[in-house]
Image (tube, helix red, strand yellow):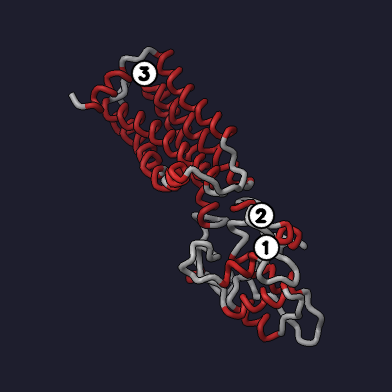
Amino acid sequence: MTPLHRIEERLRGLSPWQAFGLVAGANLILVGLAFALPADGGERGPAILSILGNFHILALHIPAAVLLIVPMFEFFERHEQATATVRRLSVFSAAGTWGAVLCGIFHAHFNGFEGDAVQLHLWGGIAASIFAGIASLLLSQGFLLRLVGQVVAIGVMSFAAHVGGELQHGDGFPFKPNKSVLTQKDVPPTPVVDNGQKRDDYAQVIAPILEAHCVECHGAKKVKGKLRMDSLEALKKGGSEGSAFVPGDLQKSLMHVRVTLDPSDEEFMPTEGNPLTKDQVQAFALFIEGKPIPDDVAKAALAATKAPKQAPKK
């Protein structure tokens, strides 16, 4: 008998109360860790837990896929008693979901995540683990009750996955097409820069660049490194590594320092998407130095930037 068969025999030998205690205890551990290791935007060690947290994105797909196919086996077989295949898949999906959420808690706490969407994703994941566990507890019940438990678990997991997808890929995921298939009507217009008129360089030039390249990881929904970049006040306040905007000082303004590093440097920003263009970097530098941004630089910088749906407030 293989080790997996021994584990299966032990699990099947549990009484209903023992099984309930196992599921409840495992998920209470997740709840306790979520409070003990908050997603507060700080980046910290030990390195092994930071690395383990990185496996969250890898670990979540397999149990999610398994949970999706369990009702298919149930529906097509329609046995009053759960088959061995359904039992194994259901228990695996519950255990796998628990492990993925554990990695997610480590990922948020040790790798610098913070924000409303991060919290929603975290607690949604814990809820998914709880309902996947409940679905496994219903294996001793009839066909219909088992099926309902599995469908509810899939619904909760789908919600948590949707929030996580938006954190990783932006608002609207997965129903938002890539830029290449958008029609001209769908593309937001580039903010107009009028010659001869006094321009608010932050609102009309800097904010759109930040919205396109920085706010996805440094906004209200997701706050990496305790740094928000969705308002001028937030830029001045800075994050765990200093201020993003120090008027008159390029060397202390992280919004300029990080975008001018060598792209191979691990602190180079942005970490995703295209690096800022020469004109966008120049616009940052002029703004920090308190100098007006020339029209040609502003237009070139905005031409390379997807206009935001709503400009950040000053």
- Number of residues whose C-alpha sits closer than 10 Å to that of mark 3, classed few (under 14), some (14–19) or many (20 or more): some
Residue found at x 37% / y 20%? 142
Residue 146 picture location, percent across and down: 40, 25
Mark 1 sits on what residue? Answer: 244
Disc 3 versus disc 2: distance between alpha carbons? 51 Å
Question: Mark 2 and 1 residues: CB-CB less than 8 Å, in contact?
Answer: yes
Q: Earlier in the sequence, mark 3 or mark 1?
A: 3
Against 63, is 220 above or below?
below
Which one is in front in this view, the residue at disc 3 or the one at disc 2? 2
- Number of residues whose C-alpha sits closer than 10 Å to that of mark 2, classed few (under 14), some (14–19) or many (20 or more): many
Q: Is residue 289 left or right of residue 89?
A: right
Quarter holding residue 65 = top left
Disc 3 versus disc 1: distance between alpha carbons? 57 Å
The quarter of the image holding the C terminus is bottom right
Label at residue 140: 3
Against 88, is 170 above or below?
below
**Residue 177 visible in the snapshot:** no
Q: Earlier in the sequence, mark 2 or mark 1?
A: 2
Mark 2 sits on what residue? Answer: 239
Residue found at x 36% / y 30%? 90
